[in-house]
Image: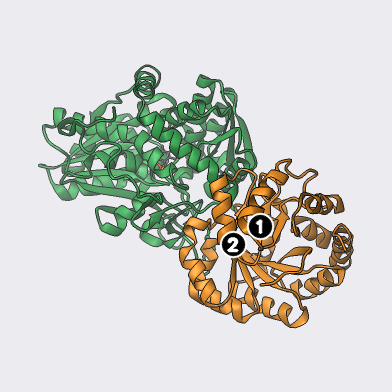
Chain colours: A orange, B green
Amino acid sequence: MNIPRPSLAVYLMANEDAPALAEAAVRGGATVIELGIPYSDPLADGTTIQRAAQAALDAGITPERALELLAEIHARVDVPLVPMTYGAIVEGYGIEAFCRDAAKAGAEALIVADIPPEESGPLRDAAAAEGVDLIHLVAPTSRPERIESAAAASTGFVYLVAAVGVTGARENLDPRVAELLERTRTAAGDTPILGGFGVSTRAHVEGLIAAGTDGAIVGSAAIDAIERGGPEALEALVRDLAAGLPS
Amino acid sequence: MSSTNTAQHGTPADAYPPDDMGRWGEFGGRFVPETVMAALDELEAGMNEAFADPAFHAELALLARDFVGRPTPLYLAERLTEDVGGARIWLKREDLAHTGAHKINNALGQAIIAKRLGKQRIVAETGAGQHGVATATACARFGLKAVVYMGEEDMRRQRPNVVRMKMLGAEVIPVTNGAGTLKDALNDAIRDWIANVEDTHYLIGTAAGPHPYPYLVRRLQAVIGQESRAQMLERAGRLPDAVVACVGGGSNAIGIFHSFRDDPVRLIGVEAGGTGGALHARSLSGGKVSILHGSRSYVLCDDDGQVVETHSISAGLDYPGVGPEHAFLHSTGRAEFIGATDDESLVAFDRLCHLEGIIPALETSHALVIAERIAHDLGPTGDVLVGLSGRGDKDVDQIAARRGME
Ligand SMILES: Cc1ncc(COP(=O)(O)O)c(C=O)c1O
């Protein structure tokens, strides 16, 4: 996967509105779309994404349907697509079948929030066989050797967790981002690094860029915007955040 | 200093450790967001240091004796035995431990380790409230801040324990997600831990979760089996034919089973059979291999991997997962897992009240259902050891309401 530098990745929950929302996000300046495949017990997620996942499940969104929605998004927008989910969903589907069907639907990379590098062997092999990148996370609490292994194992981009905690919009990003980034950069080589968790304002995006990332990932704030005002509000938010990227 | 006197204690608490990945066979491991991986490494190191340190064992042993009241008695339930008309039924009285259940064994051990690691704040989940009370107690004893997540439905059905936790100074946070039961409380406790991992220890209440928790909890609960094995040899002059314990996440069961791993003794775990129909919490006898709360084990989930609704009259067994070591014992056939329904458990509850003058917890009543059955089948020459995991004080409101008692 080749993402533009700088990049703004926007996370959407897989639901029937997702294709239209993806178009709105891309109009606003999103350069990557992450599509959440809902799971009943999303441990890494705060209340906003939990609620969105539960609503999607209540609306009958299965992993199969989520991948169909991904294919629809693929037909409508021309940016890299990255499904994001949890280990139970990938394994429930079958690791190889999931990677194959995700690739067919247009996925260029995968994020599985609760499968750390040491548990990711079978997934990495299956993804590689389909030409799909596997993205790992590095966090402010990660020790140097873990940062190195996660960054080195990541292809596509490295997901830098910019706040300790679960997903969710917040005021301040973690003050250790700069240090974390420096270590990650050394290990990641040419692979881009995007910062996420808590990104909700243009100042956050500017802060991440100033720290030296290749861009930002926005999730909960995007979902909040959609709840407030649908695709228009999403497009406006993304446009505002994208203005924080260097041109 | 862990027990190596096999003649008296059976399998040492640290025998059968998980592999380097924290797995027994394919079960266990660490399936958690990156943010807490370092905390798990730190806890694993802290556990290893503590168990290698005589001072840790001395501190825990003193508390076990003077604070918890260990060793807990082994009691021959003569009238129950007579009424069943089969093997002798022996009760390992964890209900007599301070705070009323086995949960205190784990809570104190983890609190000491948390202190050693310099953590000031403890977060825990609770279902029946026994683990919450044990955690609140251990935190009061050690001057730590306790934050306990509890599902709203469980707060309703186990109200006395909510009050106890608050009296002990714990903050109880109601969980409204999902069905408002134990699984949902674990989710939110883990999320809190992820957000506060640097000063907070997650004090899980059962033998589940990411490595090293299942191993740590088993080592701390193995005292139940160590004591009861020695007590059986002394009192009955022989080992039991079977050991029976209820399984929620599996901490009291793994604790009592462990010492008998290498003995010719049947190990029988009793899961919540719920209504006897589709609604139950039989993760091992009715679930499939998946990932939940940080480890690979048997989970009650649908074909997509989504966790399904569970039901048990007992809040402590109403959980769709189970500890990975039980999954391993199930897969190798070393342990057997059987369900007992709500209704059967209520009958066993009454029988222990009326025949022995002991009010058992509803969780524990599930073990009694199967213990009676096994005792009957074994006949008079046999011996059955039951983990009497807790007392039923917490359940009196629920049962009284059910029966329209004043
Ligand atoms: C008295 C009692 N027994 C058993 C359990 C089940 O837990 P575990 O399977 O970890 O022993 C509980 C949990 O709340 C309990 O309170």
Q: Quadrant of residue B107?
A: top left
| Nearer to the camera, B102 or A11 | A11
Residue B290 tag number: none
For label 1, the crowd category at 10 Å Cα-Cα, with few meaning under 14, some 14 to 19 and many 20 or more, is: many
Where in the figure is residue B139, as x and y percent of width and height? 53, 25
Residue B165 visible: yes
For label 2, the crowd category at 10 Å Cα-Cα, with few meaning under 14, some 14 to 19 and many 20 or more, is: many
At x 67% / y 44%, what residue is drawn?
A: A164
Specify the subunit that label 1 lies on: A
View extreme (top): residue: B66
Specify the subunit that label 2 lies on: A
Of the numbered discs 2 and 1, the one sitting upstream in the chain is: 2
Q: Nearer the viewer, mark 2 or mark 1?
A: 2
Locate residue B73 relative to residue B28 in the image: left or right: left
- The residue indicated by pointer 1 is A159
Up the image or down, A44 lies above or below A70; here it is: above
SS for callout 1: strand
Where in the figure is residue B149, as x and y percent of width and height? 59, 39
Up the image or down, B168 lies above or below A85; here it is: above
At x 36% / y 39%, what residue is drawn?
A: B218
**Quadrant of ligand 1 in image:** top left
Residue A154 tag number: 2
Q: Quadrant of the N terminus of chain B?
A: top left
Give the number of callouts.
2
SS for callout 2: loop
Locate residue A227 relative to residue B281 in the image: left or right: right
Q: Are marks 2 and 1 in contact (CB under 8 Å)?
A: yes
| Nearer to the camera, B29 or B261 | B29
Q: Looking at the picture, which amino acid does disc 2 mark? A: Ser
Up the image or down, B219 lies above or below A234; here it is: above
Locate residue B396 relative to residue A229 in the image: left or right: left
Q: Are marks 2 and 1 on the same chain?
A: yes
